[in-house]
Amino acid sequence: MSSIVMKFGGPAVATPEKMQAIARRAIEEQGKGLHVVIVISPMATIRRELQAYAAELSDNPVKREQDVLLAAEAQMTSALLSIAITEQGGKAVSLAGWQTGVATDSLHNNARIEAVKTQRIYKHFEQGEIVVIAGSQGVDSHENITTFGKGGSETTAVAVAAAINAERVDMYTTVDGIYTADPHIVPNAKKLKELSYDEMLELANLGAMIIHPRAVELAKKYNIPVVVRSSTVNVEGTLLKEEVEMEKNLVVRGIAYESDIIRLTVGYDSYEEASLADIFTVLANNGINVDIIVQAVIDKVKPTISFSIEKEQFAESLRVLESSKLSLGFSFADFEVGLAKVSIVGSGMVSHPGIAARMFTRLSREGIDVKMVSTSEIKVSVVVPQEDMIRAANALHEEFNLTI
Amino acid sequence: MSSIVMKFGGPAVATPEKMQAIARRAIEEQGKGLHVVIVISPMATIRRELQAYAAELSDNPVKREQDVLLAAEAQMTSALLSIAITEQGGKAVSLAGWQTGVATDSLHNNARIEAVKTQRIYKHFEQGEIVVIAGSQGVDSHENITTFGKGGSETTAVAVAAAINAERVDMYTTVDGIYTADPHIVPNAKKLKELSYDEMLELANLGAMIIHPRAVELAKKYNIPVVVRSSTVNVEGTLLKEEVEMEKNLVVRGIAYESDIIRLTVGYDSYEEASLADIFTVLANNGINVDIIVQAVIDKVKPTISFSIEKEQFAESLRVLESSKLSLGFSFADFEVGLAKVSIVGSGMVSHPGIAARMFTRLSREGIDVKMVSTSEIKVSVVVPQEDMIRAANALHEEFNLTI
């Protein structure tokens, strides 16, 4: 008998009515002759309340205890959902991470899954029960409760699916699938039937954060099909899998964007003083995520290094650069705000040279300045002025025939 | 190094300020050179919210999942308290029932503790940590979460104290000790310095429910000293222990009362039809708690059986009697409402004959009707009209010199 894993986020369990809807859908899936696992996130309301309470007690609550709070919240949601399923005539059992047997390392707030035991899940399957697992939690080798940080529930769903060799993971989200671009900014964007893990990863990393990259990576590793679908509307979603049939020979599969990008530039008096390793080590040690990096070596006498960061880390970046100026040996630092990143993604790109050139040509024709460029085998990102972002996304969507 | 167990109920953790006060007190106790365990109940606010949510999903939520909800609530409280302790410079670690190693049977909502492991508690003691245990929860042999029902956290505190051989349990409550009578109805009641487990048990069972009898029984079994004290005011409480020094040779140690008692009477046509066993088996099978039982056999031809029940179970009792009338063979059923129970308690009573007589004499002198009587080795209870309850309690308090 095949099994599936259904994953629901916080918004999908926000009210009793929504929970009842999930219960119905799970019973329906089981009725198709499938073993069903549900992975659930905490309800947002309880979470906010508890966090506010913890914040009153401490500005910086112990991470181990934050994990206990978070885990208890998801546990409650799993118990409530089991109650809802039972009420509708189904059979269900809730399991916390330690009961499921989700073994992790000891990095509180951001633990990594080491193994998922299957014995208990199979036992409940045999009893005809829907297994409701509290997501984003496990237990370390000292029996401390751990949680997984961002994307934790999605990662749990994929990890469980891999362990029990599930047919697929259905990720129920607030959107009904992955689109060629964000429909809010590109009105004629269209939903993709299929997408490869790599394409999804690039899109996720480029701002289209529908499924956390961590979960996509795990799905790719274990080759678990993942369906991104709506938790409210029962329509077909987007299937993530390893190999995707070429849809009408599209090379570019999607457009992603990210606003509020800031470009920082540091300049050196001589080439000898400029060390990429040094500057990015200092930034990384201070927890600053650097995205695109451009090293200008046109003039070897006065080299510059530019990189983009998110708005939230601007002040901290300036502080770090300022305090490390002497040791890093640069002579000036400069910045540009009001930028955005627009990217094209498609795994066919690697075999289609000239895609980047076509992108630059179109942007130039639109009169849009390209401030920075970054490429990988399956994507090209450009940093443009914030005010041109939407226009750039729409122009590229048209340029690469995504509407067809 | 000695250890103590501190137990706090829901009201004591209702606000961040109260939690900080607990944290301070625990750090203070540790500063005296003691290992400290805290046992905690869920915060009432979260509990109400979750119960309301569960009630929206089902009129009769699965017991197993109710236990998961309840356990998660206490877990949250334990994590918050650990955060509060850490914030004040202490070291603390929260443990759920399964982490502590509280093994129970599988009776959800009302599980019994089978064993408490000590290894993990000792490990945290060695690390100088205050161990904050989520009360009223454990794990059965199949790794299901169980909770203990009424008095569960107090019972946890005593069980843990027994396991680690603690010096004593400090039960922090909304009152500052055990009084000779409820000060609300007997204004000159006085606080007892000491009380024996048995006396406490009788008082608890007779309506003075400050510590749940289940916890007192366990304390008696393992001879764990228990101090009943205030969670808000730092004054000396009442010490419960096996042997109590006679305070001024008092025979009666306390007065307890319980209002809203109902007397039910069933009458039979002949002695042959009247079976005490039958009627109380039927009532017990329907979950009805019968307190005082009086069988009148003055006239063997028309015997009657009277018993007292709580107001809450009145309707259900009538329903049960009605539907079992034929099989039980009684000819009529009658009831009297508006009654109350007043009891005198003291372990010295057994060696002082005439105490009951003195009680009846005094009540008679006060013109108070005694409707039913029940005695044990260390208490005498009478059922009187509700409107005479307070007068009876005060008269008996005076009669047995409890004010001195």
Image: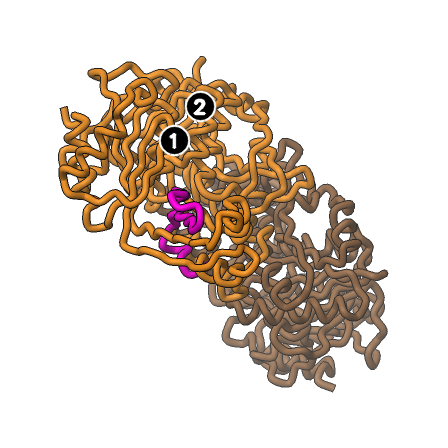
Chain colours: A brown, B orange
Tell whether B145 sits left or right of A46. Answer: right
Name the image quarter holding residue A109.
top right
Residue nearest the viewer, comparing A180 with A328 = A180
Return the x and y of residue B75 as percentages of the image width and height.
50, 42
Marks 1 and 2, how far apart at CA: 10 Å
- Callout 2: 10 Å neighbours few (<14), some, many (20+)? many
Which residues fall within the magenta stretch? Answer: B292-316
Q: Which amino acid, mark 2?
A: Lys
Q: Position of residue A269 (x, y in %)?
A: 53, 45
**Which residue is the site of mark 2?**
B220
Q: Image check: A375 left or right of B88? A: right
Q: Which residue is located at x 44 percent, y 19 percent?
A: B223
Is residue B307 in the magenta section? yes
Q: Position of residue B109 (x, y in %)?
A: 54, 47
Q: Are marks 1 and 2 in contact (CB under 8 Å)?
A: yes
- Residue drawn at 31 percent across, 20 percent down: B348
Residue A165 drawn above or below residue B143: below
- Give the camera-side residue of A299 and A305: A305
Question: What's the residue type where badge 1 is placed?
Answer: Leu
Number of marks in picture: 2
Chain under label 2? B
In which quadrant of the rendered view does residue A142 lie? Answer: top right
Query: Which badge, 1 or 2, is on the more N-terminal residue?
Result: 1
Given this view, does label 1 or label 2 mark the residue nearer the observer? 1
SS category of the residue bearing label 1? helix
Quadrant location of the N terminus of chain A in the rendered image: bottom right
Q: Nearer the viewer, residue B228 or B21?
A: B228
Task: Residue under label 1, please give it.
Answer: B201
